[in-house]
């Protein structure tokens, strides 16, 4: 059977939307309706200067709070909805509208509110949560420092405990220790969750989080708190990013978010987690939710862009057969199909994986249930999904902008703001390259240790001593089997390419081969007497490639698994989309597969040809597929894409 | 000999700059100094709202004109400098400063002024050129229509000659025939060069250019001229893009730019070029200069970004060997080297190719000297260089932004504007994908016909009938020889990888193989009875890949050839840079080389390893290399990159 046997039936977009949003279709639909009714924010983003638009975004945020949309993930006791999965769905749905609003909401309710909830105890919950949910208390999340982005453990801000006054003194000792890029800090927050090195009696206990008032009831900076505006940015005009410096600011003892550590009545440091490093990474675990939100929101932004570019490709005509007197649509062109269709397939694949991740996160709440190892798998999955989803988004919006030509450059057609606003998503909540290294460390140690905890030396030693042989043997066996299967690829063997087991086998084989190879390289490096940091640094690109291969495999498997919940009538199209996604993924790395004897040259060319055919076959239903993203007409708004 | 034998000597940046700018180092240096003295425009770009910044950019443009920098390419007779090569150098140097200024200058002096000069005759030169150069006459270039971007031949604006009144009536018959995205139109231009279908006595003669006054001496729109503002865009805030509609606007007979066609005293159409299509493409030839400028300016923008990201990578520290107490610079990391160094090498390679192109253009002036075939080669070269240079720039600035993390997102660090402003360069002066198809058509017909003139049917027929066999035979022979040479790649055969003949052979082989394969596919398609448009459309991605391979080869050869003019002391570093560029280019397409039996798997892996080693070796001199771009400190301006 070849791909283009008969035209694909056009799928029902509502059924596609239901499939994509499951099991949170109701929440998603409701939020989208709320946003559609407030779509004028998209015009305001274009028209208003920065200061005014910041206020517009704040007003929109408070409006959402008033509509009861901001507490979904918090305990009902404090006015929340108690549903963490639904809360992520809500925030990623926000990204169909203005992205400053989504980011500001993410800061307020995800990071600031999340820190109070996860790192604080009842006294903080009682005191802050209800006001935080309603927006009466606006806060920021002061983790990043100018000189210390991804390396939070190296942060310089100090919180020194003074037992005489039963208080902490928060201080910024150097310029590089200044808190930087802090969303909500430049204009609106009255309180900050500040991450600082806790010092008790000359002993440092590592990074802890503190509730620090930064503005008084007149909205003036508190004494000793210096606030600067980071000023204009490429995008996210409505988010007030700022810089915070503390000059010996005194805060009460209960300001410590004390879920994992506290100061007792005798002024001694006490903690339920003995190991400083482990405590630190448990604290950082609060970032998981933020990463899941950022990945999901990025994905939403890519869907808006793909919807616009697909509609434009179906209406805009350019050139045509001479003498026919008619120009043909852009979507008719092979290069155009090749640009858009694999990205649509990828958006579907990443959505399936995102929904799986949301459920994983949801199940671990409340109280971070489950084994530490499960928790590590969740953290790894969140890190990997965030990296791939945000890179996909950067790529997709770029392609969509180019595919819409000059029209794509005009603010009115939305791609400009989508591009500018999402650009930093690859960086915030963790730089993608750094995140993929976390994923790799987890895989190398098979999640037996908290991958965050291991420094390179410990990690390399662990791998060098134990993990290698097991992985290698298993892989060698699989390799043999797969090679036998692939030994007779004939030119017409297209059915093989569309075989799920073949696609899955390729992606799994790549991951395992990379993992085994990496283990071998680490082992060899150590056995040759290298120091662990240098050995690990020497294979950094291999590490990142391996992690990416791992996440690609998970995404593919999630996509396949998700089809079970799709209505039967849309499944044929989704099956084709899985094919396209799998083969385009393999094609993108065909150099590697060829190098490792996993693809014959004939089959490699066959994959490229098949990707082209699948694009051609799917092109007529491309618009139905992007309609499945269910971006409301009011939010599409681009004159080149709205339906009259 | 292996790559990392001994550390590379740090090259003298002034010598590198001299090499890059040759033979126009004086002009480049002078313009950079002018810009450095006016660097506050970079702050104004951030601080000023759109309307104000448009005036700032206009003032800067007039200031440049007053300083005598805007007429370099025009005849001395009209106050110009008579040096076309120097004029391109000047405009691409402008791109070190604010890009709105560069684009606005490109519109006024390149497109508007260029059209008057190249399409007009003495009466237009006498009347307009001096005022255009001084900025007393501001104009725009009204070619693109809402419904017709790349397909200019399909434009709908009409210019109907009325012999009774000895006048043309310019009219916009439909919405899709509206002139769109026209730079300088929304606010400042008083005159437009309008491209319109010329109709004389019910007969259409195709697209011609007309001088149309669009604003009166009170700066109000002329009667019948409707001007709209395209509004905010992703970037280029200082460029006033507008939309023009004409409602039966009457212009005098001499308004026709009549170098190639005119209306005689009896009201008859006369032209020195009989064929309508050929005349049309001769007219479009005026775009060459604009394309050369856009490619060069894009390249300049990438250099600013690479300078900033490289300096940041050398100062910013993150993580480090545990226990060492010190974090290491970002540049120490393999993934970071891998991101930046190949882009630096590519910027050098594209610069060498750009300088070659400028000389080619320069030699064809004045009066478009030389054979039509040479002219076609120049047009092809300009189209290809523009596509590769602008895509490189989009990639490079993206990578630099990510490599600078959150700091890269702040406006003060310049990458934001660089990203937003250059985003549309891949689209304007010709969409890159369309341009590469022009390049391919020229190659397939060996420039024997004006590639623009051939419609797909003519082109495909020509190829199918003549060109194939010659190309195939030559390629087959070469293939055999190269395969023999590559038959014994040993693991340690690194010297071979650094052999210029090997590198050149690979790039040339790819191009010729793609060209022969394409000819075969076209021939087969036609012999199987397909219609030419469908046959051509079916191989569109192959066409684009082939054109890209061709331009890559030219860029490589230009880079190699350029080393002869470099000072001996900097040559060792440049040789390494050529190696890195060549191998990274091959690596990026190694899937293709493997598929076509041109790389063994061992050698393919060897190339990847060698690229890594070259990056490592060049990392210590990366900053000297970007200093060679000679971006003045005043224009670097980014707090993360300026030297104190």
Image: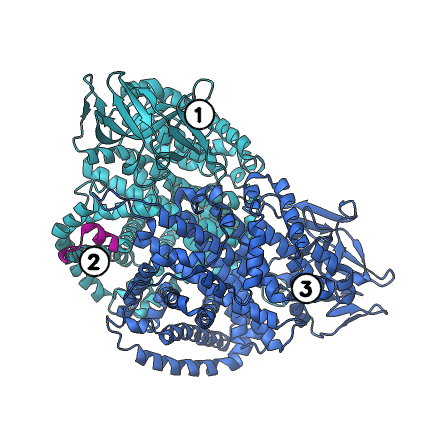
Chain colours: A cyan, B blue
Between residues B9 and A324, which one lies in front from this camera angle? Answer: B9
Read off the residue under disc 2: A517
Between residues A158 and B492, which one lies in front from this camera angle? Answer: A158
Placement of the C terminus of chain B among the 4 image quadrants: top left
Q: Which mark is residue A65?
A: 1
SS assignment at label 2: helix
* Residue B162: quarter of image: bottom right
Q: Position of residue B586 (x, y in %)?
A: 37, 67
Kindly report which numbered mark, 2 or 3, lies closer to the viewer in this rendering: 3
Which circle's residue, 1 or 2, is located before the other in the chain?
A: 1
| A495 is within the stretch colored magenta | no
Gap between marks 2 and 3 measured at Cα: 62 Å
Q: Are marks 2 and 3 on the same chain?
A: no
Q: Is residue B124 above or below residue A468?
A: below
Whether residue A75 is visible here, answered yes or no, is yes
Read off the residue under disc 3: B74
* Residue B92: quarter of image: bottom right
A527 displayed left or right of B568 = left
Whether residue A627 is visible here, answered yes or no, is no
* Residue A322: quarter of image: bottom right
Q: Which span of residues is magenta-colored?
A: A526-539
Kindly report which numbered mark, 3 or 1, lies closer to the viewer in this rendering: 3
Tell me the chain of label 1: A
Gap between marks 3 and 1 measured at Cα: 63 Å
């Amino acid at each position: 059977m070849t791909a283009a046997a008969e035209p694909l039936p056009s799928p029902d977009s509502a059924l596609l939307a239901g499939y994509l949003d499951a099991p949170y279709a109701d929440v998603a639909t409701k939020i989208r309706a709320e946003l559609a009714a407030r779509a004028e924010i998209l015009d305001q983003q274009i028209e208003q200067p920065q200061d005014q638009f910041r206020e517009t975004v704040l007003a929109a945020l408070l409006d959402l709070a008033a509509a009861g949309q901001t507490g979904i993930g918090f305990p009902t006791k404090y006015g929340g909805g108690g549903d963490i999965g639904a809360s992520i769905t809500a925030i990623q749905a926000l990204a169909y509208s203005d992205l400053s609003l989504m980011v500001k909401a993410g800061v307020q309710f995800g990071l600031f509110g999340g820190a109070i909830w996860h790192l604080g105890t009842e006294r903080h919950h009682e005191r802050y949560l209800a006001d935080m949910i309603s927006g009466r208390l606006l806060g920021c999340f002061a983790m990043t420092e100018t000189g210390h982005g991804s390396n939070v453990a190296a942060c310089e801000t100090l919180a020194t405990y003074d037992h005489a006054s039963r208080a902490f003194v928060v201080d910024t000792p150097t310029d590089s220790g200044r808190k930087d890029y802090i969303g909500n800090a430049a204009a609106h927050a009255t309180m900050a969750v500040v991450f600082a090195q806790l010092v008790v009696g000359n002993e440092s206990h590592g990074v802890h989080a503190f509730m620090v008032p930064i503005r008084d009831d007149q909205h003036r900076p508190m004494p000793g708190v210096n606030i600067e505006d980071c000023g204009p940015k490429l995008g996210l005009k409505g988010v007030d990013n700022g810089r915070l410096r503390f000059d010996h600011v005194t805060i009460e003892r209960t300001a410590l978010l004390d879920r994992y550590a506290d100061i007792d009545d005798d002024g001694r440091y006490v903690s339920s987690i003995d190991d400083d490093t482990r405590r630190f990474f448990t604290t950082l675990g609060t970032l998981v939710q933020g990463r899941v939100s950022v990945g999901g929101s990025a994905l939403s932004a890519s869907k808006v862009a793909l919807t616009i570019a697909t509609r434009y490709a179906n209406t805009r005509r350019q050139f045509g057969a001479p003498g026919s007197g008619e120009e043909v649509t852009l979507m008719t062109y092979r290069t155009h199909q090749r640009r858009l269709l694999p990205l649509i397939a990828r958006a579907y694949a990443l959505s399936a994986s995102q929904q799986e991740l949301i459920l994983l996160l949801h199940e671990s709440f409340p109280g971070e249930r489950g084994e530490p190892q499960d928790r590590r798998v969740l953290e790894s999955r969140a890190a990997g999904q965030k990296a791939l989803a945000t890179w996909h988004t950067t790529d997709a919006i770029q392609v969509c902008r180019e595919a819409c030509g000059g029209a794509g450059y005009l603010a009115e057609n939305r791609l400009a703001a989508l591009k500018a606003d999402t650009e930093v998503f690859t960086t915030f909540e963790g730089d993608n390259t750094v995140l993929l290294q976390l994923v790799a460390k987890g895989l190398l140690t098979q999640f037996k240790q908290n991958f965050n905890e291991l420094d390179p030396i410990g990690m390399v030693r662990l791998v060098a001593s134990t993990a290698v042989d097991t992985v290698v043997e298993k892989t060698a066996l699989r390799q043999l089997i797969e090679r036998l299967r692939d030994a007779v690829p004939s030119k017409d063997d297209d059915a093989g390419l569309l075989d799920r087991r073949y696609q899955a086998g390729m992606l799994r084989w790549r991951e395992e081969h990379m993992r085994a190879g990496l283990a071998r390289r680490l082992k060899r490096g150590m056995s040759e007497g290298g120091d662990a940091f240098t050995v690990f640094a020497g294979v950094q690109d291999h590490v990142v490639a391996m992690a990416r291969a791992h996440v690609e495999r998970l995404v593919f498997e999630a996509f396949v698994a998700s089809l079970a919940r799709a209505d039967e009538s849309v499944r044929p199209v989704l099956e084709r989309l899985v094919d396209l996604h799998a083969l385009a993924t393999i094609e993108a790395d065909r150099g590697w597969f060829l190098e490792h004897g996993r693809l014959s040259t004939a089959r490699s060319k066959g994959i490229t040809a098949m990707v082209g055919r699948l694009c051609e076959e799917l092109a007529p239903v491309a618009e139905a597929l992007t309609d499945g993203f269910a971006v409301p007409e009011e939010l599409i708004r681009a004159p080149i894409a709205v339906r009259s």
